[in-house]
Amino acid sequence: MTFRRGVLIVLEGVDRAGKSTQCARLVQALQQNGRRAEIIRFPDRTTQIGQLISSYLEKKSNLEDHTVHLLFSANRWELVPLIREKLEQGINLVVDRYAFSGVAFTSAKPGFSLDWCKQPDVGLPKPDLVMFLQLSPEVAAQRGQFGAERYEISSFQQTVQQRFEEIRNDTSINWKVIDASRSIEEVHTDIKSASEKTIDVAQHLPVGELWR
Ligand code: NYM
Ligand code: MG
């Protein structure tokens, strides 16, 4: 049997679009089909850098805006050796947020260009598929109260949604927009089929470099 690498699949979207639920469902479905699959989520709050980020998000500390952007990126880079190792072992990785959230959230702040925001993440392992869970901020708001974390404000989320739209114009990325307003099952069926198709193709190709 020829060797097949794992593929890197990312789920993105605004808060409450259903990313975490769908990541868990996808990993379960891939495993049931006899594939190896694991979840990774960003920010990974378990590392030292992740703890700085978590404390910032919980508003227990303040960080300068450029600084926290670079910490979010550093939190991805510190996981790159692990990501590469897993992919080489043939483990498919389902990632809950990636550099696209990094760019969308920071560039929603005044004075930050998309281009500046992308730079620290240039060269990360490139996802083979990025599924954007599309949900209008109005419908998202009906899904329940915001928590108390930083950024969980409707007006800010509207801007984040616009930034995601701009980021999706980048044709170097394999984007798939998923209508996340449907039932969990319907959304899952789409995500599963897009993921299976991507695995069939990408497992034979080398891992790319993001934005390079
Ligand atoms: N976030 C997430 C960023 O601002 N930059 C990033 O690079 C990433 C990965 O962190 N509101 C923001 C988006 C979320 C917040 O994410 C925490 P989660 O998935 O709620 O733990
Ligand atoms: Mg959250």
Image (cartoon, rainbow, N blue to C red):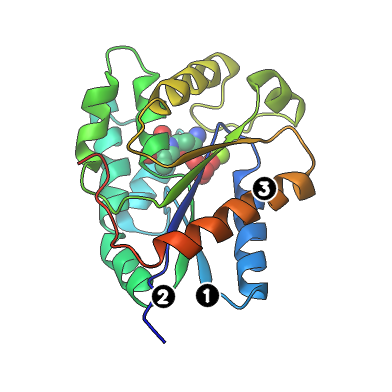
Q: Quadrant of residue 98?
A: top left
Residue 36, labelled with which disc?
1
**Residue 60 visible at all:** no
Disc with the residue nearer the chain's start (1 vs 2): 1
Q: Secondary structure at mark 1?
A: loop
Mark 3: few, some, or many residues within 10 Å (few <14, many ≥20)?
Answer: few
Mark 2: few, some, or many residues within 10 Å (few <14, many ≥20)?
Answer: some
Q: Is residue 74 left or right of residue 149?
A: left
Task: Name which residue type carries label 3.
Answer: Asp
Q: Is residue 83 above or below residue 69?
A: below
| Residue drawn at the location 42% of the way across and 42% of the way down | 174
Kindly indicate whether the residue at mark 2 contacts the one at mark 1 (C-beta within 8 angstroms): yes
Label 3 CB less than 8 angstroms from ligand 1: no
Task: Name which residue type carries label 2.
Answer: Gly
Q: Secondary structure at mark 3?
A: helix
Question: Which sits in the foreground, 37 or 195?
Answer: 195
Which residue is disc 3 drawn over? 190
Residue 90, labelled with which disc?
2
| Residue drawn at the location 50% of the way across and 18% of the way down | 156
Instruction: Please provide percent x and percent y for residue 173.
Output: 37, 39
**Residue 90 visible at all:** yes
How far apart in space, not on screen, are marks 1 and 3 (Cα)?
Answer: 20 Å
Question: Which sits in the foreground, 37 or 129?
Answer: 129
Q: Is residue 77 above or below residue 159?
A: below
Q: Is residue 149 above or below residue 86?
A: above
